[in-house]
Image (cartoon, grey):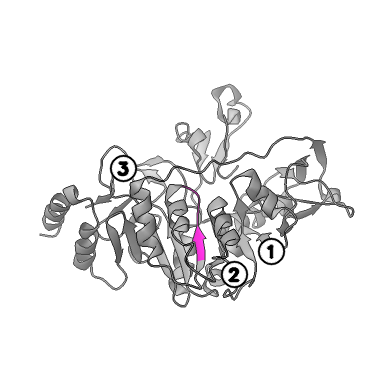
Amino acid sequence: MHLHTWGPAAYADGAYAESFRTTNLFVGHNLRDRVGSERVDYLPCFLSEIPNLFRSGRRAPDVALLHVSPPDAHGYCTLGTSVDVARAAVDTAAVVIAQVNPRMPRVHGDGFIHMDQIHHWIDVEAEIPEAPAAPIGPVEEAIGRHAASLIEDGATLQMGIGAIPDAVLAALHGHRHLGIHTEMWSDGCLDLIKSGAVDNSQKKVHPGKTIGGFVTGSRPLYDYIHDNPSAILLDIAYVNNPGIIARNPKVTAINSAVEVDLTGQVCADSIGSRIISGVGGQMDFIRGASISVGGKPIIALPSRTKHGKPRLVPQLQAGAGVVTTRAHVHFVVTEHGAVDLAGKTLHERARALINIAHPEDREGLAKAWRDLTR
């Protein structure tokens, strides 16, 4: 049972069918082609609620497998780069097994675990996997500019990893007094911290601190968070709690989508019925941002796929999952502009979304909408 993983994922191979069943809480690229059987399955759940799956006993792990930093003088290791749901796993598992790695940063927050809590461990010295930055092309750059134009000085940011979040962050170097409260962060946020655009001074929850549940990025990022009391990783049930999120000012949440229909329904975890990722924390932050004073929940996506298919569509594909409902959606951004759907009727939404669709798709979308609403 795991969130996103990297690498070959041999535990999901057919050769181990008698040994393992794999429950994906978020599907990574390495398992997309194997999800769909009872043996390699997907469990949809808001990221904020996964710790309660463990703590309530519904999905309490028997064994927790951890990767930790070495113990300090008092015997405390940390969960390093990933506190997220690992904190709840430590608290509920009957057996805790860890590899202790001096390359894992010692990170402040909820990830402290004493050696007395670890039943078995092995010492290793291996590099922590790094996530190279995705290339930013003209489409991502345009999306970044449009999204950045919505972000105010003093806003509290949530965004993930990838070309679009990186493009948004790259467009924010002229902003001031930004804060970070996000499920995960990477090198794009680190650049803003170092430039002075992020100082976390306007936040109401943990002012002066960069807050997340996990980090993924480069070795310089891991070195930055090592023993740094201004960079804190906390239990994801807390980080992604919409009530906690909403206490910060101007929460601006940037999330992606596979496709958006003309009524505003957002599919983000599947292509049709094929699961490619997960529910994750999108709804946690969409809701938290929408009830934050001055908050702006944003769905950002290219108007077309890499193969030229529209991503703003009359109707979602058959079997597609709705991660963000039409009642929750606010801003939608493509490379052709940004629209706010909150407070708009279905017809007003359709017109707005057609205006930011790819120019070659607009006439077809308008005709399809007319046919649907006759």
Quadrant, the N terminus: top right
Label 1: how many Cα within 10 Å (few below 14, some 14–19, many 20+): some
Q: Quadrant of the C terminus?
A: bottom left
User: Which residue is under mark 1?
Assistant: 230
* Residue 64 visible (yes or no): no
Is 3 on the left or on the right of 360, as rendered?
right
Q: Give the image location of residue 114, x and y in percent.
A: 83, 52
Q: Which residue is mark 3?
A: 305
Which circle marks residue 200 in the picture?
2
Label 1 to label 3, Cα distance in Å? Answer: 39 Å
Q: Which residues are magenta?
A: 157-162
Q: Earlier in the sequence, mark 1 or mark 2?
A: 2
Q: Quadrant of residue 24?
A: top right
- Mark found first going from the N terminus, 2 or 3: 2
Of the pair 273 and 349, the residue shown nearer to us: 349
The mark closer to the camera, 1 or 3, is 1
**Percent position (x, y) of residue 325?**
36, 61
Labelled pair 1, 2 in contact (Cβ < 8 Å):
yes
Q: Residues within 10 Å of mark 2 (few under 14, many from 20)?
A: many
Question: Could you say which is closer to the camera, residue 62 or residue 228?
Answer: 228
* 12 relative to 270, above or below: above
